[in-house]
Image (tube, helix red, strand yellow):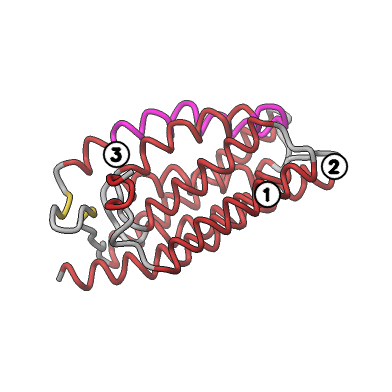
Amino acid sequence: MEKVKNYFNDWTSFEKAWLLISTLLILSLSLYWGDGIVGIVASLTGIWCVVLVAKGKIANYYVGIINIIAYAWVAYSWRFYGEVMLNMIYFLPMQFVGIYLWKNKMDSSVKRVKVRVMSNIVRARWLLAIMSTIGLYGVWLNSLGGNLPFIDSASTVLSVVAMILMALRYVEQWVLWIVVNIASIGLWTFALMNGGNDIAILIMWIAYLTNSIYGLKNWIKLYTKGD
């Protein structure tokens, strides 16, 4: 218990409150709507994971492993194939890559990762590659008969790039996560409006969006302090 208490010593009141409120909101609404246990697990671990990322804590990757498996299961039931492939083929192994890359780049004094930013030229190159890939992948998902293929494609491609930038400790990852979260809210709103009861997943993505905005702000602060 003492270890848990020490782990939260550097957390602000806002961060503790945000984690608690998100957890209680997901649990209460999920139980009310009769959400499945897998969806609840995916939502809760997802919230805990992104809050830990915003804090620059390496523990996010361990929680992320559970989240990825649970979320992929729910996405498969809705034929969001891009989401399934993204999580099982890419996100899952990237958790282990992230653990490896972050371990040697931690600020031992506060137990947070050291962050950095990229140049404008590098940003432009990434943007061009992203837009081209979204179009091509969307066409392929459409040929598979997937639902909302281009929104699914945008969510998938941007998530791939954002995860790479996250492992490499770039602040810019958060801009992409914001767009990913908006696209994913669209996907799961579609599912809910078409007979689904995965309200926990939708709440999770709304919470992700809020957290990604906070994460961007916090990582800019961490970068400024690092300089």
Which residue type does callout 2 highlight? Answer: Asn
Front in this rendered view, residue 47 or 127:
47
Q: Is residue 161 above or below residue 144?
A: below
Where is residue 73, by image quadrant? top right
Task: Residue lying at the far front in this picture: please name it.
Answer: 1
What residue is disc 3 on? 98
Earlier-in-chain disc, 3 versus 2: 3
Could you say which is closer to the camera, residue 48 or residue 173? Answer: 48
Graded by Cα atoms within 10 Å as few (under 14), some (14 to 19) or many (20 or more), the crowding at tag 3 reads: many
At which x and y percent is residue 120?
29, 67
Where residue 91 appears, as percent x and y from the top left, is: 43, 34
Q: Which residues are magenta?
A: 74-97
Disc nearer the start of the sequence (1/3): 3
Mark seen at residue 138: none
Contact (CB < 8 A) between labels 1 and 3? no
SS class, disc 1: helix
Q: Position of residue 165 (x, y in %)?
A: 33, 50
Secondary structure category for the residue under label 3 = helix
Mark 2, secondary structure of its residue: loop
Q: Is residue 3 left or right of residue 201?
A: left
Question: What is the CA distance from the residue labelled 3 to the residue labelled 2?
Answer: 36 Å
Give residue 194's mark. 2
Q: Residue at x 80, y 43 (%)?
A: 33
